[in-house]
Amino acid sequence: MTRGLAALRVLARGGGPTLLWRAVLTAALVGAIGLLPWLSRTDPALTVLKARSADRDPTPETLRAVRDQLGLDDGPPALLGRWLGGLLHGDAGTSWVSGAEVLPDVLQALGASLLLMAGALVVAGGTAAAVCARTLRLGSRGRLGTRRPGGTASAVLAALPEFLVASVLASVIGVQLGWLPALGWYGPQWMVLPSLALGLPAGAVLGRMLDDLLPGAFAEPWALAAAARGVPPKSVARQAVRRCVPGLLPNLGLFVVGLTGGSVAVEQIFDIPGLGRLTLQAALAQDLPVLQTGTLALVLLAAAAGILARLTARLLIGPALRDGALRSPHPPGRRVPRALPLLYGALLAAVIGLGLPRDAVALDALGRLQAPSAAHPFGTDALGRDVLARVSHGALTTLGSALAVSAAALVAGLLLGLLPRLSGPLVDTVSAVPPVLAGLLVAGVAGSGSWTPAFAVGVVAWAPLAAHTSSLLRQERATTHLAATRALGAGRPYLLWHELLPAVLPPVTRHALIRLPGVALSLAALGFLGLGAQPPSPEWGLLLAENQPYAERAPWAVLFPAAVLALLGALAVTPAGVVRL
């Protein structure tokens, strides 16, 4: 109890400026959403009218009636003021489209999303445990040096798009086999498939991050002493996990928010009335009361998850964080996996090289949905276009955008992570914005374009890296060697360049490499939802979205692009473990 109160006092220190900064960020986000209809340079009355009834004729009189009903002529400040005034009294207004009370609908959607998030976290925990099982078994027995580099299976799993996993589970297990329901949200049975679709990729990413930290924990003196005294391996493994979990908790909080509001594609496929789907529909219809209330709920959830994660990390580390008694969590050197990255890179280069000479937009009405053959190694799609050609040409834009976004996210994450009081509330606020909503805001401000999805993903991609940087920096500042270096007269610039950055940069860079397929997935998800590239572009997300309806009749049109995306994940993860300074 005493430790908990002390942690709360430490967390609340400087809370006034932090709380003010958090309030400013929330107000800016909600205000930007309130400007969405005007930023998009469209008539909000026309958008709302089409959302209410697509067949209704938009006459000037009808549009004038909609404007008068909603008060659109009063302008964004008046609309935002009325919404905020009602919110202070527990009234979030009524939907511009359906006319229903907003707050009950948002709370009901939030409950469904939280329930889905809980199921996904259970699946993610089991997946992460499976990914780290081999490292835990060998490390707890002092035989970690015999471990060979691996992790290809987890890399492939982490690289699979959530919407693709959801579609396969729904069509195979739900429809063809009939083992579980594939549509709706009526009870525990309806949770299984969407929880698997969300939890498997998320658990693979968390497992990779934990697997990266475990060797450093097993190399610490306490682990060596425990092994020498004959402490049971299970106890050693349990303490190693406890030692590593504080470094993962900030990102776990981000996963909670992402699984709650960012699972739009999965909610669309399984017809789940969740908050992500509700906010997407409200954004497309420019239903501001629903969109602002849903976003505010996500921001509050993100703030609560972030504060709880930081508090739990302090409780787990204990007085060592205050007394500077931690050991620097540098993992020992590993064997360099030279063959696997070369093999994966050669395979990816071969696929791209074989497909580039082919025409990616040539139509063949007589060759629709042809199976793989010598003429078309990856088969053809519903328009008779060569799938190999489209995968290869799409790789140039998808991989280029993913690399550029990942590099920018790494730099921004490192710089902002070094300023935790500034970046903490910013990370919580940004993580509450699903990439889909970010894409709509970016498109509304700057218009649709080939770079719009990349910019939208980049707006939120730096947040996990900044949270990881801040978490590692907090622990590195509490190490004994840093206290000794400071006692010898080292100044802040020396400590930053010679002690802190060399300790933080390698694991954050490995984290960025692990998330490279996730960046490509976010770009693909925007394409899948129609917010990215437009036909006839061969961008991977659009390619998967176009071929998804024919997955049962022509599975090669979906499996081959997904396999190349999984190959990218394996290529990104296998060399990540040897990034060192």
Image (cartoon, rainbow, N blue to C red):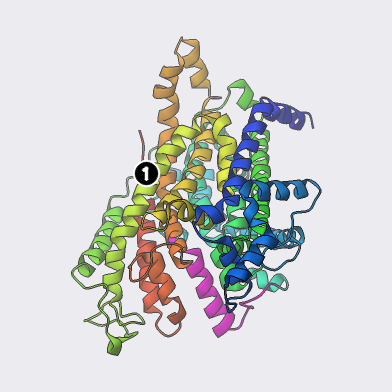
Q: Residue at x 31, y 68 (%)?
A: 391
Residue at image point 50% right, 74% down: 168
**Quadrant location of the C terminus?**
top left
Whether residue 194 is situated above or below residue 293 in the rendered picture: below
Q: Is residue 410 magenta?
A: no
Left or right relative to 449: residue 81: right
Label 1 residue SS = helix
Please state the horizontal and vertical placement of residue 172, each as a whole percent of the image.
53, 79
- Taking the image as shown, residue 487 lies to the left or right of residue 350, namely right
Q: Which residues are magenta?
A: 159-185
Q: Could you say which quadrant of the image residue 519 lies in? A: bottom left
15 and 177: which is toward the camera? 15
Image quadrant occupied by the N terminus = top right
Residue 402, percent from left and from top:
37, 53
Residue 508 quadrant: top left
Q: Is residue 494 above or below residue 219?
A: above
Evaluate whether residue 142 shows in this view: no
* Residue 367: percent from left, percent from top: 29, 87
Q: What is the x, y in percent for residue 11?
A: 68, 30
Residue furthest to the right in view is 89
Q: Which residue corresponds to the image point at 69% horizontal and 72% vertical from the top-left?
A: 185
* Residue marked by disc 1: 407
- Is residue 287 in view from this perspective? yes
